[in-house]
Image (cartoon, helix red, strand yellow):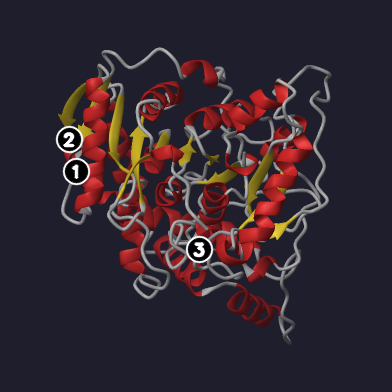
Amino acid sequence: MKLYELSAARLISLLEAGEIKASEIQESVQKRIDEVEDRVHAYATLDRNTETGSSKSAGGESVLDLKGIPVAVKDNICTKGVPTTCSSRILEGFIPPYDAAVINRLKKANAFLLGKTNMDEFAFGSSCETSCYGPTHNPWDLSRIPGGSSGGSAAAVASGEAILALGSDTGGSIRQPAAMCGVVGLKPTYGRVSRYGLIAFASSLDQIGTITKTVEDSALLMNVIAGGDENDSTCSNEDVPDFTKSLEGGIKDLIIGVPDEYFVEGLDKEVEEAVNEAIKLLSGLGAKVERISLPHTKYAVSTYYLIAPAEASSNLARFDGVQYGLRRDAEGITDMYKVTRSSGFGEEAIRRIILGTYSLSSGYYEDYYLKAQKVRAVIAGEFKEAFKKVDCLITPTSPTTAFKIGERIEDPLKMYLSDVFTIPANLAGLPAMSVPCGFCGNNLPVGMQILAKPFGEKTIFKTAYAYQENSQWHKRKPSL
């Protein structure tokens, strides 16, 4: 029995039965890292000195216990004493003096933290190629990208280099790599999980979420990290249910909406067939399927690429060589800013900073950024109306399977369109999950996306679990 291949839920049941020890799981995963990391390159930093936390909170009350299950964390989530660089030269040498809220909760829940996973620089990308550490490779085909920007987290879980992982999702950065690596990726409702300690890309869009082997594992990890936080004013105090209890019950009479705008030209034929077969399966389990329209979806990508770079331009202004990270000396402070930022940021980061600064500049703000916010409100309104008629929506996660490393890096527009199906959920603040639903002829995974209304994660879990329990795709493993 290869412990690194098992789900967290299965490992916890074995631990509770006394059949294995936590140290055996940790040793299995660390041995797996030693075996394959030089080929996958899932990690930016490995922490060989990690310790599990206490299963009691500071107030003494019991919290969920992960019993030493190994967890990987994206390199933009602050971890006290461990380098956290957003995979960018500009944060070279930065070691946070504090833990992000989610890290604090993981430690209290007895998680075994493995290290920080590789990512597109500052989460700017859909392929995990813009990292200053070099690209991560897809475990299913090492010549291909794992998706991005949370490519390292997805590749780590898929390859057995982690049991659970955290990522962040601004326009699809959890769901798209989860689809391309054949694992489960959840972007929770905006505000469901604290962003305190998440190094910001676009503050109105960013959300921390889970990347796991199974739907049950996602529910288990969400039980640990979700909930209000006084350190994050955007974090909701909405009651957090036990997500593991929402898995059962079936989907009889559930109404599934299938938006026409997500099945359009540019969608790979094999991906479309796999998603349609998944919808048929859910229909056979008692769900009702209805075709719907979300006509403003076609404006989501252009809207996103005005709002997200604008917020990124503002958030990244703090990286100037003064307080932390990289510093290049020059004669005057203006020159110091210029040479530090020019050498510290990569090409894609510079492109987005320039785009964002331009759309916020005098004379263009109303024509670009403000107009984009108005379109965003229209898109959110369409989803709100749709959820009055249906319980959830099902779409492809990505229009294609994983493409070759280097194939799109010189074509930013083609790269941006990789997130065409995932971006709308971020603009509207919706929860959304990618679940494995098939493989193409080249043996690359396909993901199905399930969306629900704000704080409707229970519906997503119920739907995803019903599909998982009646399919076998999540059981397939890459042969490395």
434 or 286, nearer to the observer: 286
The answer to whether the residues at label 1 and label 3 have Cβ atoms under 8 Å apart is no
Name above or below for residue 201 compared with residue 380: below
Q: Quadrant of residue 387?
A: top left
Mark 2–mark 1 distance (CA, rounded to whole Å): 7 Å
Choose the circle earlier in sequence order: 2 or 1: 1
Q: Amino acid at mark 2?
A: Ser
Classify mark 3: residues with Cα within 10 Å, few (<14), some (14-19) or many (20+). Answer: many
Q: Where the N terminus falls, by quadrant?
A: top right
What residue occupies the far bottom of the structure in this picture? 331
Residue bearing mark 1: 261
Q: Amino acid at mark 3?
A: His
Mark 2 residue element: loop
Q: In screen coordinates, is 106 left or right of 413? A: right
Mark 2–mark 1 CB contact (< 8 Å): yes
The one of 1 and 290 positioned closer to us in this rendering: 1
**Can the viewer see residue 112 in this picture?**
no
Q: Where is residue 431 drawn, in percent x and y?
A: 43, 33
**Label 2 neighbour load within 10 Å: few <14, some 14-19, many 20+:** some
Give how far apart the Cα atoms at labels 1 and 3 are. Answer: 31 Å
Q: Quadrant of residue 463?
A: top left
Estimate the x, y position of residue 72 in percent, counting from the top left: 65, 47
- Residue at position x 46%, y 43% from top? 183
Q: Nearer the viewer, mark 3 or mark 2?
A: 3
**Which dot, 1 or 3, sits closer to the camera?**
3
CA separation, marks 3 and 2?
Answer: 36 Å
Find residue 137 and name its label.
Answer: 3
Which residue does the numbered mark 2 point to in the structure image? 293
Determine the secondary structure under disc 1: helix
> Image height check: is 88 above or below 276?
below
